[in-house]
């Protein structure tokens, strides 16, 4: 049997719907260990029908080995499955059904939730409905121009090469172009494309409606500014002044 906290959090509860011939609607009961069915008034489920045994026809109990609930008939009574088998003990689970004479019993499942839990779920669904779609994974063109240690050009070597042919450095993913003085060659088209891709990503994170992420924007602006994008430096200065 679930605890009260589990029940309020939506743990499924097994129910039994009793369909007595002549009654307009079935009567539903919550099942748990110890529930009894019979004609006597001291049963938890009283069924006033001659096919149901008296004082007690059957008893619900917990199967400690297999888990779940079962129903066992008191001697000499039995119940009949939907396959017309007369049995004395059967498992109870959602969508199970059996008969005692002309009285039909159907198992079902319900979930109870505390009002706070229902409200929380409604708020979460509403928040998901207005959330902007996630930003696509950023694409930055890879640069393989010069070794960052010795500044040897790596343009002639295959893109699959992992090491600098001159100094043996394991080449990182991005190898920007360097000039003879060891400075970045900002006129190189590959570097320019890479730098502006960084700036555009920063602008995207800063200006996306409903999905602004200033920390991410600043991160990309700082990378672009280090390479020398004036607009990125201006955005960082503007944020510091603001």
Image: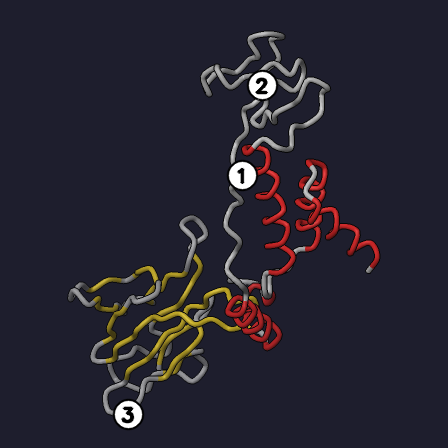
Residue 173 lies left or right of residue 226; in this view the side is left
Query: Residue 58 sits in which quadrant?
Result: bottom left
Query: Residue 106 sits in which quadrant?
Result: bottom left
Q: Which of pointers 3 and 1 indicates the residue nearer the eye?
A: 1
Query: Which numbered dot is residue 79?
Result: none
Which secondary structure, mark 3?
loop
Residue that lies at the very extreme toward the left in this rendered image: 84
140 or 49: nearer the viewer = 140
On the image, the x and y values in percent for residue 97 come to 27, 69
29 or 156: nearer the viewer = 156
Question: Neighbour class for label 1 at 10 Å: few (<14), some, many (≥20)?
Answer: some
Residue 213 lies left or right of residue 18; in this view the side is right
179 or 58: nearer the viewer = 179
For mark 1, what is the residue?
A: 140
Which secondary structure, mark 1?
loop
On the image, the x and y values in percent for residue 169 come to 62, 13
Disc 1 versus disc 2: distance between alpha carbons?
Answer: 17 Å
Q: Residue at x 30, y 77 (%)?
A: 53
Residue that lies at the very extreme toward the front in this rendered image: 187
Which quarter shows the C terminus? Answer: bottom right
On the image, the x and y values in percent for residue 40 come to 39, 83
- Dots 3 and 1: beta carbons under 8 Å? no
Closer to the N terminus: mark 1 or mark 2? 1
Disc 2 versus disc 3: distance between alpha carbons?
Answer: 81 Å
Q: Compared to 115, does 141 lie above or below?
A: above
Question: Neighbour class for label 3 at 10 Å: few (<14), some, many (≥20)?
Answer: few
For mark 3, what is the residue?
A: 24
For mark 2, what is the residue?
A: 171
């Amino acid at each position: 049997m679930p605890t009260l906290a589990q029940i309020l959090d939506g743990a499924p509860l097994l129910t039994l719907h009793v369909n007595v011939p002549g009654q307009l609607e079935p009567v539903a009961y919550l099942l748990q260990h110890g529930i009894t069915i019979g004609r006597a008034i001291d049963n938890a489920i009283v069924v006033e029908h001659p096919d149901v045994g008296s004082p007690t026809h059957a008893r619900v109990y917990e199967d400690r080995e297999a888990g779940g609930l079962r129903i066992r008939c008191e001697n000499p009574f039995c119940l009949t499955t939907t396959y017309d088998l007369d049995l004395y003990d059967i498992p109870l689970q959602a969508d199970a059904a059996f008969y005692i004479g002309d009285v039909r019993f159907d198992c079902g499942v319900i979930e109870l939730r505390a009002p706070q839990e229902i409200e929380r779920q409604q708020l979460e669904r509403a928040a998901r409905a207005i959330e902007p779609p996630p930003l696509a994974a950023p694409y930055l063109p890879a640069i393989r121009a010069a070794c960052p240690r010795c500044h040897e050009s790596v343009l002639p070597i295959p893109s699959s090469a992992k090491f600098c042919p001159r100094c043996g450095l394991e080449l990182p993913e991005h190898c920007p172009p360097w000039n003879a003085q060891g400075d970045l060659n900002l006129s190189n088209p590959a570097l320019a494309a890479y730098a502006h891709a960084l700036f555009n990503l920063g602008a995207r994170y800063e200006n996306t409606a409903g999905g602004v992420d200033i920390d991410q924007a600043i991160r990309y602006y700082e990378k672009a500014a280090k390479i020398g994008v004036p607009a990125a430096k201006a955005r960082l200065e503007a944020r510091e002044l603001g």
